[in-house]
Image (cartoon, coloured by chain):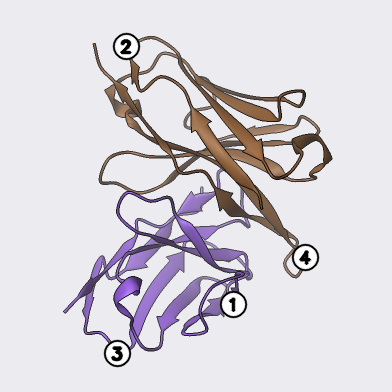
Amino acid sequence: QLQLQESGPGLVEPAETLSLICTVSGGSISRSPYFWAWIRQPPGKGLEWIGSMYYRGSTFYNPSLKSRVTISIDTSKNQFSLRLSSVTAADTAVYYCARHSYDSNTDGDYVGYWGQGTLVTVSS
Amino acid sequence: EIVMTQSPATLSVSPGERATLSCRASQSLSSKLAWYQQKPGQAPRLLIYGATTRATGTPARFSGSGSGTEFTLTISSLQSEDFAVYYCQQYNHWPPYTFGQGTKLEMK
């Protein structure tokens, strides 16, 4: 059974870079033809897609965050990571790592698996 | 960017009754729409994809309908564990993938 687990600092200072890692178990990133994603949720608010990376390396980012976001994959550790630079209080959120699943009927990719999420607070 | 609008923001329903949640897209999605359930302190859980297909483990009382720009999630007979926040998400026009703002289903 596929499981995803986020890890990283729970507190980041303003203007610094937020860095999170998602460790995948129950499946190999390098042998899974899927997108791996980061999604966030500010406290008490809705969900915002940050970006996704295809297992072969293509990346797609939310235009609203594109200038500050980097998603990368480390197949040797079966992990993928998120870096978000120049953070402000508005970046305080629960960050989820996730995996897309392919819908052959519609030829589309929806988010099929989610990690439990990790709260990152931006504050000095 | 596709804007997803869910209504109502809050829905109060008694256990055993039927709940109907709506999701509207600013452009046609064909059937590329998913529904998620989120309980407090938990990650979202996939319920429906392709507008109408129940995900593995989704009870039969949950059903999705619609195509184009208008979609509905129906829960036929509410159980206590169904009270949660529900989100719709489009995956037809991306980036970015976009979510609705959520409907909170509360016990009446």
* Mark 4 → mark 3, Cα distance in angstroms: 34 Å
Task: Please state which amino acid type lies under the numbered disc 1.
Answer: Thr
| Residue A20 in the image: above or below residue A25 | above
Q: Badge 3 is on which residue?
A: B16
Q: Which mark is residue B52?
A: 1
* Mark 1 → mark 2, Cα distance in angstroms: 44 Å
Q: Nearer the viewer, residue A58 or B61?
A: B61
Q: Chain of mark 1?
A: B
| Residue B103 in the image: above or below residue B72 | above
Q: Badge 2 is on which residue?
A: A13
* Mark 3 → mark 1, Cα distance in angstroms: 22 Å
Task: Please state which amino acid type lies under the numbered disc 3.
Answer: Gly
Q: Badge 4 is on which residue?
A: A104
Q: Residue at x 34, y 58 (%)?
A: B39
* Mark 4 → mark 1, Cα distance in angstroms: 13 Å
* Mark 3 → mark 2, Cα distance in angstroms: 48 Å
Please tell me whether mark 2 sits on a helix, a strand or a loop.
loop
> Which chain is in purple here?
B
Q: Chain of mark 3?
A: B
Q: Chain of mark 2?
A: A
Percent across and percent down for residue A19 are 49, 19
- Residue A110 can be seen, yes or no: yes
Between circles 4 and 3, the one closer to the viewer is 3
Q: Are marks 2 and 4 on the same chain?
A: yes
**Residue A17 image-quadrant placement:** top left
Q: Nearer the viewer, residue A25 or A48?
A: A25
Task: Please state which amino acid type lies under the numbered disc 2.
Answer: Glu
